[in-house]
C-alpha cells in the first residue's frame, strides 16, 4: 500500500496550529509521516509541534532563519524525496486551515492515474466561522485549465486542497527561484505529466484572515500582474520542464513571452489583436461572453505605459 506524507510549513503559527494538528488526528486515512519545517518562528510554534509528537508521526525540522513559505515547502519535499517511493502520495498542509476528516481518503480514492488531484473547500474566517460554502464558487475557480492557460500565469489550484504522487517530484524539484508560489509550480508540472483532476467534494476548511501569506482574495495592480506573468513565463522557458511541453505549447510560450515583453516597450502592437483572439481560450479562460472576449483582445494591443497614462490602468 502506498505511503502518505504530509508536508507542513510553519511560521509563527501558534494561534491556529493546534486546530490544524487536531484535524490531522481525525483523518479517516491517517498519514504515515508528517514532515514539518518551521521557518524560523519566534513564538511557540515549535513547542506546539513537539507536544504532538506522541500523537502524530511527526518529523520536525526547525530552521534558524526565515526564508519564506516557498523555501520551507521546498525543503519539506526534499525530505520526502529522500525516503518515499514513486507511487507514494504527498499532501501539502498550511498551519492555519482545518482539514475535514475524509480529506486524505477522498483524494486518495479519486486520484486514479493523474499526477495530482484537488478538491473544494469551505471558507472560514479568523474565528473559525463559516463565511462561504465553496472556495471554488466564491473565487470563480475553474475545475480544469489547459496547459496553455497555465503558461499565462493562471492557476486554479491551492496547495492545501491537493494530493499528488511522489513521482512528480522529479519535475518539481528543485523549485526555480523565480516562481511566485510553490503550488502554482507543482500544478504546472503535473499538467504536463499525467495531468491534474478535480473533485467537487470539500476537503478543507480554508481560513481567510489578515495574515494569509497567499490565497483567495489576493490582489495585484494590473501592471504588477503583467510583470508577474512575464516573470513566470520566462522562468518556465528557462526551466528543465520546458522541453516536456508539446510543440504547440512551446510555440505559444515563446509568442506569449514576446507579446508581454513588447507591452513594456511599445504603446501599440496591432498584431497582438488577431493573436490574442486566436489564443483567447488560453489568455481569458474565465471569460465567456463574446463582447468581453472582443474587448480584451482589443486591449491586448495597448502597451503598459500608454494604459497607465491615458487609460488610468494602475
Image (cartoon, grey):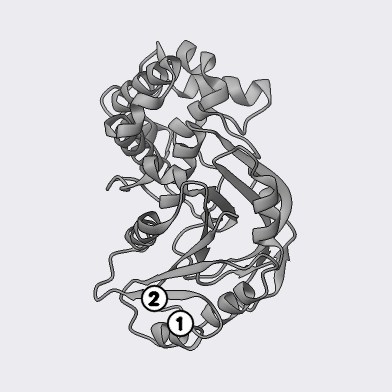
Residue occupying image coordinates x 40% and y 11%: 271
- Looking at the rendered image, the quarter that the N terminus falls into is bottom right
Residue 47 in the image: x percent, y percent?
Answer: 41, 88
Q: 11 or 304, which lies in front?
A: 11
Give the image quarter of residue 250.
top left
| Label 1 CA crowd tier, 10 Å (few <14, some 14–19, many 20+) | many
Q: 207 or 33, which lies in front?
A: 33
The residue to which callout 1 is attached is 49
Structural distance between the alpha carbons of marks 2 and 1: 7 Å
| Label 2 CA crowd tier, 10 Å (few <14, some 14–19, many 20+) | some
Q: Answer left or right for 34 relative to 105.
A: left
Residue 187 in the image: x percent, y percent?
Answer: 49, 42
Q: Is residue 184 visible?
A: no
Residue occupying image coordinates x 61% and y 37%: 113
Numbered circle sitting on residue 60:
2
Give the image quarter of residue 305.
top left
Q: Is residue 148 visible?
A: yes
Q: Are marks 2 and 1 in contact (CB under 8 Å)?
A: yes
Q: 106 or 265, which lies in front?
A: 106
Please, what secondary structure does the residue beneath circle 1 have? helix
Q: Answer left or right for 262 relative to 77.
A: left
Please, what secondary structure does the residue beneath circle 2 have? strand
Mark earlier in primary sequence (2, 1): 1
Amino acid at each position: 500500500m502506498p505511503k502518505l506524507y504530509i508536508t507542513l510549513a510553519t511560521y509563527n503559527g501558534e494561534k491556529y496550529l493546534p486546530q490544524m494538528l487536531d484535524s490531522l488526528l481525525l483523518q479517516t486515512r491517517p498519514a504515515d509521516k508528517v514532515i514539518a519545517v518551521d521557518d524560523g518562528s519566534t513564538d511557540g510554534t515549535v513547542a506546539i509541534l513537539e507536544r504532538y509528537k506522541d500523537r502524530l508521526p511527526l518529523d520536525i525540522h526547525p530552521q534558524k532563519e526565515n526564508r519564506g513559505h516557498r523555501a520551507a515547502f521546498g525543503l519539506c519535499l526534499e525530505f520526502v524525496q529522500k525516503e518515499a517511493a514513486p507511487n507514494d502520495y504527498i499532501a501539502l498542509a498550511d498551519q492555519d486551515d482545518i482539514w475535514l476528516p475524509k480529506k486524505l481518503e477522498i483524494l486518495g480514492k479519486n486520484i486514479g492515474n493523474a499526477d495530482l488531484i484537488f478538491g473544494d473547500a469551505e471558507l472560514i474566517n479568523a474565528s473559525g466561522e463559516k463565511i462561504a460554502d465553496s472556495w471554488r464558487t466564491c473565487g470563480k475557480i475553474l475545475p480544469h485549465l489547459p496547459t496553455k492557460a497555465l503558461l499565462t500565469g493562471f492557476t486554479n489550484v491551492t496547495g492545501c486542497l491537493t494530493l499528488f504522487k511522489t513521482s512528480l517530484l522529479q519535475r518539481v524539484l528543485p523549485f526555480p527561484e523565480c516562481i511566485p508560489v510553490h503550488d502554482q509550480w507543482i500544478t504546472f508540472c503535473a499538467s504536463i505529466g499525467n495531468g491534474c483532476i478535480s473533485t467537487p467534494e470539500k476537503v478543507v476548511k480554508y481560513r481567510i484572515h489578515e495574515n494569509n501569506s497567499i490565497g483567495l482574495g489576493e490582489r495585484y495592480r494590473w501592471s504588477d500582474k503583467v510583470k508577474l506573468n512575464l516573470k513566470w513565463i520566462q522562468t518556465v522557458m528557462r526551466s528543465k520542464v520546458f522541453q516536456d511541453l508539446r510543440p504547440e505549447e512551446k510555440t505559444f510560450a515563446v509568442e506569449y513571452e514576446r507579446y508581454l515583453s513588447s507591452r513594456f516597450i511599445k504603446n501599440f502592437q496591432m498584431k497582438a489583436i488577431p493573436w490574442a483572439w486566436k489564443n483567447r481560450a488560453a489568455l481569458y479562460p474565465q471569460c465567456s461572453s463574446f463582447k468581453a472576449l472582443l474587448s480584451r483582445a482589443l486591449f491586448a494591443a495597448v502597451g503598459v505605459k500608454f494604459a497607465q497614462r491615458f487609460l488610468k490602468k494602475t
